[in-house]
Amino acid sequence: MTNGLTLRQQLDRYAGPDSLRRAVADVVAAFAEAAIAIADLTGRGALAGITGQVQGRNPDGDMQKDLDVRADQIIRASMKGLPVAALASEEAIDVDILDPSAPISVAVDPLDGSSNINTNMTVGTILSIVPTPADIRATFMQPGTAQLAACFVVYGPQTALILTLGDGVDVFTLDRDTGSFRLTAATVKIPADTAEFAINMSNRRHWEIPVQAYIDDCMAGVDGERGRDFNMRWIGSMVAEAFRILTRGGIFLYPADAREGYGEGRLRLVYEAQPMAFIMEQADGAASTGRTRLMEIAPKALHQRVPLVMGSRDKVRRLERMYTNPNVKPENAPLFSHRGLFRI
Ligand code: AFP
């Protein structure tokens, strides 16, 4: 049940007289305004000069599209004058120090799903808010459990803002008549188990055996271990997969794989996986590397990658058991046993 509260009203309720909460509320409100501007750019596409053209490479060597750069600029401009000590972005190699005395800092993925920009597919923006530690250099080396808030915006048919302030997950939908976000789903809970998984199947041969075994069991459907058929989705924008999982459950996997540069998967810990993990857990879901709870990992580098499995709690736990089950090895994996993929 929702009461159509605006995001601003919800943030004011959360903040009250507390100065730290007020700082968080002001940053989320500014981020929401920036997201509305990015949504407008995304929605106007080529008419706004957005073509998905590659303009360079980001710090990690990924192709940097025009909307990546514009979104980063919009977010940075929105943080000016706010109580933000440090700003980390996927699009910048170093951390920006804004107001070193400020109590909070932010990490952003300005545009998640860049490869979808020129195909008119859903993309989004991700935000993590953390307390600024005494040593500002350690700001983005904190585990995900230190986060004060996490938020992502999905630029899809609806522009939706998903927010946790540490006490559940709420969904706000952009009211295009008023230009403000309104509460449309309160205290969202992810269904514990849904027969749907999201993974890029083209990488199957590169995955670790436990992931292959987990997915092969799903693919075996009603004839296999699971005794039920499964559905698959892969959009290429984690924000879209996350919104679907919050809506109807399921599991998203971007595991480590054997390709060069993918030994720790593709997603970045600080500004993608940590905020998503916070939201998943706050919605009674789970987030893991497959071996460990993702929220407990302390980053060692700003652009560090991490394997990410998130979604319905029971599904994530089942995947984790694959890593500890001694029987999960190539010769026992269903697909290998049928096809003898390990022919000598
Ligand atoms: P980009 O922002 O570089 O397009 O990456 C998006 C993403 O990090 C995540 O949102 C997708 O789930 C994943 O990459 C898609 O990766 P593949 O293109 O390897 O399937």
Image: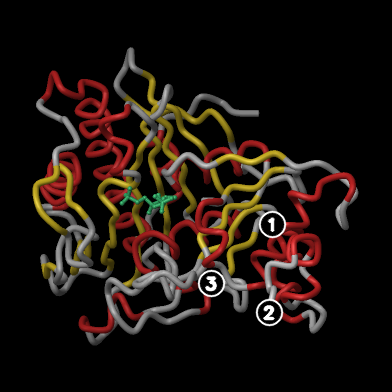
On screen, residue 213 versus residue 45, left or right, reads right
* Secondary structure type for disc 1: helix
User: Which residue bears the numbered disc 2?
Assistant: 344
Q: Closest to the observer: 309 or 39?
A: 309
**What percent of the width, then of the height, locates residue 27?**
27, 51
Could you tell me which secondary element the residue under label 3 belongs to? helix
Local packing at callout 3 (Cα closer than 10 Å; few below 14, some 14-19, many 20+) is many
Q: Is residue 68 above or below residue 256?
A: above
* Disc on res. 294: 3
Residue 87, x across and y down, in percent: 20, 64
Quadrant assignment for the N terminus: top right
> What is the crowding at mark 1: few (fewer than 14 residues within 10 Å), some, or many (at least 20)?
many
Q: Is residue 86 left or right of residue 323?
A: left
Name the amino acid type tagged 3: Leu
Q: Are marks 1 and 3 in contact (CB under 8 Å)?
A: no
The residue positioned 42% from the left and 64% from the top of the image is 148
Residue at the (9%, 47%) spot, across then down = 55
Q: Provide the residue designation for mark 1.
A: 215
How many angstroms separate mark 1 from mark 3 (CA)? 20 Å
Ranked by sequence position, the earlier of labels 1 and 3 is 1
- Estimate how packed mark 2 is, as few (under 14), some (14 to 19) or many (20 or more) residues with alpha carbons within 10 Å: few
Q: Secondary structure at mark 2?
A: loop
Give the spatial CA distance, label 2 vs label 1: 24 Å
Q: Amino acid at mark 1?
A: Ile
Along the polypeptide, which appears first: circle 2 or circle 3? 3
Q: Is residue 85 above or below residue 283?
A: below
Cβ at disc 3 under 8 Å from ligand 1: no
Residue 71 vs residue 120, the one in the foreground = 120
In front of the other: 89 or 258: 258
Q: How is the image coloured?
A: secondary structure
